[in-house]
Amino acid sequence: MNDVRKMIYGTLIGFFLVLGVWFSIIYISACGFTFTCNQAAPLVERTPIPTLIPAAHSESQMAVSMAEFDKCQVPASDLIGAWVSAGYLESEPFPFLDVAGQACEGSYKDDIQHLFVENGLWYSGSIGCVSCHNSDLSDRSFGLDLTSYESLMLGSRRVAGSSSKGNDIFGGGDWEKSLLHEVLVNQGLVPAGHSADVPPVNLIIFAGVRINAGEASATPTP
């Protein structure tokens, strides 16, 4: 009887010893000889710091960036007024003042023409002036075609011929007496053919370039 007990006890003790040795081997292989088990921490895979490739700026790109930086901020109606007051010429630059009172210079091609052509420019959802003022809608456009400088000048003479005062849309160079001033400023873009639900707007745009006082071709016109 005692021999059986010894056998049973011996078997149990041997089993637990083997179990303990087995767990010890697993722990040591996983954590090493430490109680913090640092070796069991998840492996963090770190990517190398990306190398920033220097951007290659060509002289043309730098010139474009500088040109955009030098543009002036001005109300669109004031810009058109400066162009009219300067003689509403096609190719010659005209002076104007930006919102900060700095002297600037613009041109019809670069700064004025797109104001008559672009959609959604004067207010959200608006259509370009040429949508009505073109050669295909002479009755609706009052005979005024804004699609090009040549057609604009022709339309101006046509309007002057039909006016009782013989005055063209430019007011003979007097901006405040011109029909353009009446439409863009006094009527706030709500004459016949425009939405009467739209309040008067004072569109601020970037146009022209800043000029030094000594480079101005004429006294800037506000």
Image (tube, rainbow, N blue to C red):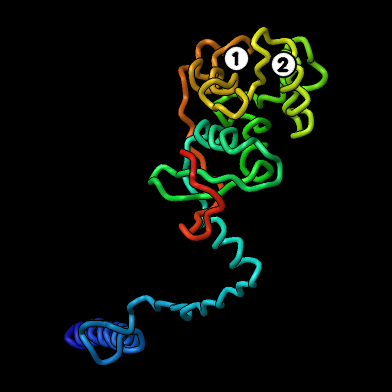
x and y percentages locating residue 140 in the rendered image: 73, 11
Secondary structure under the numbered disc 1 in the rendered image: loop
Q: What residue is drawn where x is 68% and y is 14%?
A: 166
Q: Is residue 152 found left or right of 175 in the rendered image?
A: right
**Which residue does the numbered mark 2 point to in the structure image?**
159
Could you say which is closer to the camera, residue 221 or residue 35?
221
Position of residue 215 in the picture relative to residue 59 (left or right): left
Residue in the picture at 82% in, 18% down? 136
Q: Is residue 71 left or right of residue 154?
A: left
Query: SS of the residue at dot 2?
Result: helix
Q: Does the rendering let one see residue 114?
A: no
Residue at the disc numbered 1: 194
Residues 149 and 174: in front is: 174
Query: CA–CA distance between discs 2 and 1?
Result: 19 Å
Question: Which corner quadrant of the image does residue 13 belong to?
Answer: bottom left
The x and y percentages for residue 21 are: 29, 88
